[in-house]
Image (tube, coloured by chain):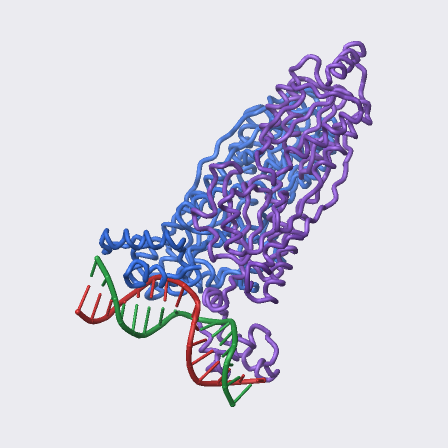
Chain colours: A purple, B blue, C red, D green
Amino acid sequence: MSRIEDVARIAGVSTATVSRALRGLPKVSEDTRARVLAAATELDYVASPTAASLASGKTRVVGVVVPYVTRWYFAQLISGASRVLRDHGYHVLLLDVGDNGPQRTMLLDSRMLSKRVDAVLVLSLQLHAVELDLLRRLRLPVVTVGTRTEGWPSVSIDDVEVARTATRHLVDLGHRDIAFVGGEPTPHPDFATPSDRRRGYEEVMAENGLTVAPDRVVSADWSVRGGAAAGERLLSATPRPTAVFVASDEMAMGLLHTAGRLGVRVPDELSVVGVDDHEQAWVHGLTTVSQPVQHEGEEASRLLLEALARRGKRGQAPDARSDSAHDADAEAVIVPTQLLVRGSTGPLVPALPAERRAHARSTVQAGR
Amino acid sequence: MSRIEDVARIAGVSTATVSRALRGLPKVSEDTRARVLAAATELDYVASPTAASLASGKTRVVGVVVPYVTRWYFAQLISGASRVLRDHGYHVLLLDVGDNGPQRTMLLDSRMLSKRVDAVLVLSLQLHAVELDLLRRLRLPVVTVGTRTEGWPSVSIDDVEVARTATRHLVDLGHRDIAFVGGEPTPHPDFATPSDRRRGYEEVMAENGLTVAPDRVVSADWSVRGGAAAGERLLSATPRPTAVFVASDEMAMGLLHTAGRLGVRVPDELSVVGVDDHEQAWVHGLTTVSQPVQHEGEEASRLLLEALARRGKRGQAPDARSDSAHDADAEAVIVPTQLLVRGSTGPLVPALPAERRAHARSTVQAGR
DNA sequence: CTGAAAGCGCTTACAG
DNA sequence: CTGAAAGCGCTTACAG
């Protein structure tokens, strides 16, 4: 492997000039630049990223933190984010911490981040307090997706609105006994997706004078299997709900599977609406509120690149006061979502008029 | 951020000793080690990976090359591989080259790899000739999954056997008119999966005296949508095949969707068997030949760690002859697969005895 | 527009 | 078991 010195010798200039010419910095004469490029090409020279990092203090690497690479949603985010980063000359260090709970791999403990990356993308993951501290101490630019942390830009969807749209769709179809399958609620205020989607559902129910009986709300772990299990509980009740709003398509697919197994016909006996527009939602004819996941990843990368650019312009943060990695007015991008009606939802069919109506009335009356 | 010098001063030793103590090298007295650790803890010291890399020539980073993060199969591989790597102190640089064709991002052009990583994992991806050259010139340890390149260890399944198992299952059920949906064949001899799966199918057909009419073989792009399109062609034929072996579960799910849309009953009118045991195969009741994808990723990482260890022991490769990154007898691990029978396959139902029999006989006779 | 030289923060023979 | 010193290969003020 050739070094910068070799190039300098062949081009007949100093290493400083080689460095400037190769990085496209100004104040290098065209003639000199050409000679340097020729020499570099001849030697197949590529600057050592390691040496460049040590000297410049920049790694050109972005850490991307995810709980699971294997879930569709996260893979989409990674894909979108990494494409944009790569197009801007950044590499992706994948930090698959393996879980969303308190037991997961800690960024700090494993020294995964320290001095390795220029910035961090946190994808729908609740960081622990020590990790937040670490990132803040490191003064790294951070952008989050799906969570909202003070001082850091974020990209997300309006989870309350998503749930409202889905639930309203079911109400508009005449359903009154509408159940909800949500993600496990978390104690973290920053990761509001589970509670927001539930809130949107409850709001629309209330606005339409519909009460939510406790047994109509079930939590699952966002997986297909979890959704199937939630379906067992919901669909074995008597009377059954006539519609379900499921907080993710993967869980909705699981629920559809259970419905099929139990012989519950969709949409005649049960309407189901999910969230995401998962790649396979159409295979199941699943009505859903779609979100542009890849786009969210791209957008997050762009925000990160902007922060990196700001930081580069300013040089090192001179003092805590003007720390651009922690803006009070950090941008919060909300991307649009859209209801996609497919075959899994349909108008309420009063198959058992008396029973249904009685139940609807009784649950309404049971409300407080 | 504290530097090694700070730790040395506080501990009252040289930086060399700090370096040795912190890395757990032998020949450091217990007493000294304890003092160094205490000082490091006090200062929250973490060695700069960048400086360490420059000095040692090792980055502790492994490049993981994939065509798409978003496909289930690749996400599983990444997940398995990165867990093992992380547990051994290696980071993952994700190189999502975005496609499997000739137009994809080149590792060489973008200087993605040069001097950034200690080793490379190539996941079911056909490298171009220039990339192979690059990797060989760089003398990096490389392990491949799903492809076989001379000199590099690999992990894969026996694709011919997988296809044989699936096809035999259909034959055993009495089917004679069995179609095949495969991945697009590639011109690369190293990436034999598409042709191997087709070959296994053809072998079993021939062994059972069954001929394969040209219109019973369709290619798709491994996606759900591609499988659905393949289903259109296959299921609109008259007579229809009574069974299909589909080279991946995702394509099989697409085909099942088309069958449902066209009113073709599974398994009464059509048996379908896939490959992978995709996370959602059970939701569709899909019979499949399962492969332990995560495990393959883990196994590949282990082979890579072994190569890294060998290399570390030997020091730098002294000459081309003993270059361990290119062993002639590189290990080729074949992991076992298994037929998983679910509801999508069933015995041949002679719904239209005359027609079926006539067709079976004619195709047999058409054979050469 | 260009160069000499310091410095980034470690690791690693070498010597003792 | 420990230290002094060279060296990894760049970038970046500084000076001209």
Which residue lies most toward the front here? A321
- Residue B191 appears at what percent x and percent y? 53, 49
Observer-nearest residue: A69 or A117?
A117
Q: Name the residue at 48% across, 57% down.
A: A116
Left or right? Give the position of B358 relative to B34: right
**Which quadrant of the view contains residue B119?**
bottom left
Observer-nearest residue: A197 or A265?
A197
Relative to B360, residue B120 above or below: below
Q: Using the rendered image of the protein, determine whether residue A29 is visible from the camera's viewpoint.
A: yes
Relative to B86, residue A180 above or below: above
Q: Using the rendered image of the protein, determine whether residue B99 is visible from the camera's viewpoint.
A: no
Left or right? Give the position of B141 relative to B318: right
**Which quadrant of the view contains residue A22?**
bottom right
Q: Indicate the quadrant containing the C terminus of chain A: top left, top right, bottom left or bottom right.
A: top right
Observer-nearest residue: A290 or B205?
A290
- Residue A140 appears at what percent x and percent y? 54, 56
- Residue A257 appears at what percent x and percent y? 64, 25
- Residue C5 appears at what percent x and percent y? 42, 81
Q: Name the residue at 69% across, 35% down.
A: A275
Q: Indicate the quadrant containing the N terminus of chain A: top left, top right, bottom left or bottom right.
A: bottom left
Relative to B265, residue B134 above or below: below
Relative to B251, residue B131 above or below: below
Which residue lies most toward the top here? A354
User: Number of marks in the image?
Assistant: 0
Observer-nearest residue: B334 or A211?
A211
